[in-house]
Image (cartoon, grey):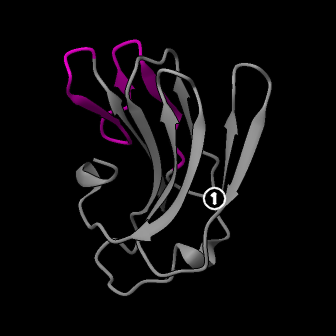
Amino acid sequence: DLDSHLTGPTPSGGRFHVFYSHTIENEAAELDVDDTSSYGPETITIHRLIPGVYRYAVHDYTNRNANPSTGLAQSGATVKVFLSDGREQTFTVPNAPGTVWTVFEIDGATGTVTPVNAMSYQSQPANVGM
């Protein structure tokens, strides 16, 4: 089970975290589709950006306690970003061990998407992307 995670700034200076156990953050973002039984897709929509860094990651929940783990790298996962101006970007999971794939960041002030494409380990879903 691969899970989508989005973290981002809150107006009060904290950070929000949208994922399967917290599917909506006020009017800022929501997990629209959470696929728990097959190969996706999962969809997170950002409704409005505020200044700050947004971070999108994929967590390999199935193998979350394995270290090392290549399950995520071998999954063939792809992430597509659809921007409001019609542009889109596609990212493919790197061939590296890890249970978290940090895919990209968005600058909330400019809307610029910056690839991160880094693998790491995290067993606790609530800590992904934070």
Direction from residue 85 to residue 69 in the image, left or right: left
| In the image, farthest residue toward the front | 110
The front one of 42 and 105 is 105
How many numbered tags mark residues here?
1
Q: Is residue 19 left or right of residue 88?
A: left
* Residue 85, horizontal then vertical, whole percent: 76, 19
Q: Which residue is the extreme one toward the bottom?
A: 68
Residue 52 belongs to the span the image colors magenta: no
Q: Quadrant of residue 19?
A: top left
Percent x, y for residue 101?
48, 62
Which residue is painted at 59% across and 32% down in the image? 112
Q: Position of residue 34 (x, y in %)?
A: 50, 42
**Residue on which the image places disc 1:** 39
Q: Which residues are magenta?
A: 11-35
Answer few, some or many: residues within 10 Å of disc 1's Cα (few below 14, many 20 plus, some between 14 and 19). Answer: few
- Report if residue 26 lies within the magenta region: yes
Q: Is residue 60 above or below residue 37?
A: below
As shown in the figure, which amino acid type bears the numbered disc 1? Tyr
**Which of the pair 57/30 is nearer the observer?**
57
Residue at 48% across, 20% down: 109
Q: Is residue 95 above or below residue 9?
A: below
Q: Quadrant of residue 13?
A: top left
